Image (cartoon, rainbow, N blue to C red):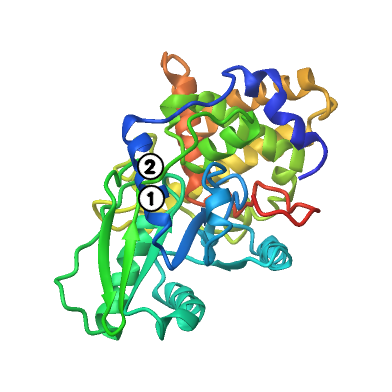
């Protein structure tokens, strides 16, 4: 990420809120249940976010997980930089840890995970009539989506006795609040347990907390949309990402003509999962137009930047200027009192849905330690 980026979490505009605390009441009870059931698990699938392979690990559970037969599933690989992903796989391999990037919504991807799970269980299948697989992870890394995909595959692959249930999936962290068991195979009987996403009670490292918030594992209201958006802009600026957006005017150069309206039936909120209706051509062009405007604005601001990216005041001034440019790019009226929050929300939506590109926010460690 570069030397400058490692300081971002300590900068005034990022660290202003201090350590991030989000530990709803159900998490304390869930943590106790998870610890107890981990003792019985034959294998653990630890789901992490591919964009933050280390930051999305639950540090409190790592000592117990490290002693278990485990597969780390780096989910949301479709949102992560594929050019760096192989380095993370190699890193975990050097740590003697099985790791596989997945997309929980892709059956072919989940099948590869199941193949690895079966391979890891092969040595105990002959000894135990019933095997238990636990799926764990911090909130909103895609555990429930993975459970649902596993059930779809298992229904065709295995003779299942019970009527299968689906895990609850939602766009917000903390949707799954009970531990539920699902039978996915018979002879031997294999059960998969879905568990609530559990964070540590406090995340003292501000940078880690901001990464979790940016990826959606901590509710925006806990950290503040504006603070998260400031962090994202700092990350993009220090990396020089807008300077690499060389395709932002490609459609216009190709001569594609289209019109956009300030008010449009299809908005950025429709980029979330489970939209009410699939977007048509005009909807796609509307979103692409907003993305183009955002990329042009950030590209322009960075090419004209004369300050020192390593200087906190210069970087803060740049981010303030970019907020104003984003407000115009996203067509948010200046007189709106909540304009900055609206800018932050829309900007974060574009990032989280991959419209601004594919990213990995963590650096590959140089030491062989899985955390």
Indicate whether 19 appears above or below 40: above
Number of residues whose C-alpha sits closer than 10 Å to that of mark 1, classed few (under 14), some (14–19) or many (20 or more): few
Indicate whether 121 appears above or below 74: below
Image side of residue 184 versus residue 271, left or right:
left
The residue closer to the viewer here, 277 or 366, is 366
The residue closer to the viewer here, 246 or 74, is 74
Q: In the displayed orientation, state which residue is furthest to the front.
A: 127
Callout 2 touching callout 1 (CB < 8 Å): yes
Residue 231 in view, yes or no = yes
The residue closer to the viewer here, 92 or 338, is 92
Residue 186, given in percent of the width and then of the height, sits at 26, 81
- Quarter residue 319 falls in: top right
Quarter of the image with the N terminus is top right
Real-space Cα separation, disc 2 to disc 1, in angstroms: 6 Å
Picture disc at residue 36: 1
Residue 20, given in percent of the width and then of the height, sits at 53, 26
Residue 237, given in percent of the width and then of the height, sits at 72, 36
Q: In the displayed orientation, state which residue is furthest to the left.
A: 163
Residue 332 in view, yes or no = no
Residue 91, given in percent of the width and then of the height, sits at 72, 62
Picture disc at residue 32: 2
Picture disc at residue 147: none
Element class at badge 1: helix
- Quarter residue 86 falls in: bottom right
**Residue drawn at 61 percent across, 17 percent down:** 16
The residue closer to the viewer here, 328 or 320, is 320
Indicate whether 178 appears above or below 343: below
Image side of residue 110 versus residue 183, left or right:
right
């Amino acid at each position: 990420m570069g030397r400058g980026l490692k300081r971002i979490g300590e900068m005034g505009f990022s660290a202003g809120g201090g350590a991030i605390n989000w530990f709803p009441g159900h998490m304390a009870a869930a943590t106790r249940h998870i610890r107890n059931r981990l003792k019985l698990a034959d294998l653990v699938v630890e789901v992490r976010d591919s964009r933050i392979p280390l930051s999305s690990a639950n540090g409190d559970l790592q000592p117990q997980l490290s002693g278990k037969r485990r597969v780390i599933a780096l989910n949301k690989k479709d949102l992560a930089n594929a050019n760096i992903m192989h380095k993370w796989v190699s890193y975990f391999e050097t740590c003697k840890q099985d790791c596989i990037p997945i997309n929980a919504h892709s059956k072919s991807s989940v099948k590869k995970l199941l193949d690895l799970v079966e391979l890891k269980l092969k040595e105990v299948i002959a000894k135990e009539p019933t095997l238990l697989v636990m799926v764990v992870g911090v909130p909103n890394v895609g555990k429930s989506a993975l459970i649902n995909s596993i059930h779809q595959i298992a229904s065709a692959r295995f003779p299942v006795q019970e009527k299968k249930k689906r895990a609850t999936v939602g766009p917000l962290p903390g949707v799954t609040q009970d531990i539920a068991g699902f039978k996915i195979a018979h002879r031997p009987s294999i059960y998969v347990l879905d568990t609530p996403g559990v964070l540590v009670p406090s995340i003292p490292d501000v940078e880690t907390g901001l990464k979790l918030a940016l990826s959606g594992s901590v509710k925006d209201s806990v950290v503040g949309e504006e603070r998260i958006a400031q962090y994202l802009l700092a990350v993009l600026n220090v990396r020089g990402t807008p300077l690499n957006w060389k395709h932002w005017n490609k459609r216009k150069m190709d001569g594609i003509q289209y019109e956009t309206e300030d008010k449009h039936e299809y908005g950025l909120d429709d980029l979330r999962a489970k939209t009410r209706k699939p977007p048509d051509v005009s909807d796609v062009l509307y979103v692409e137009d907003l993305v183009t405007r955002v990329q042009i604005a950030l590209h322009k601001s960075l090419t004209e930047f004369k300050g020192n990216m390593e200087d906190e005041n210069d970087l803060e001034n740049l981010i303030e200027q970019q907020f104003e440019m984003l407000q115009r790019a996203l067509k948010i009226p200046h007189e709106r009192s909540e304009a900055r929050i609206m800018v932050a929300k829309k900007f974060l939506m574009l990032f989280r849905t991959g419209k601004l590109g594919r990213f990995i926010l963590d650096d590959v460690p140089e030491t062989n330690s899985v955390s």
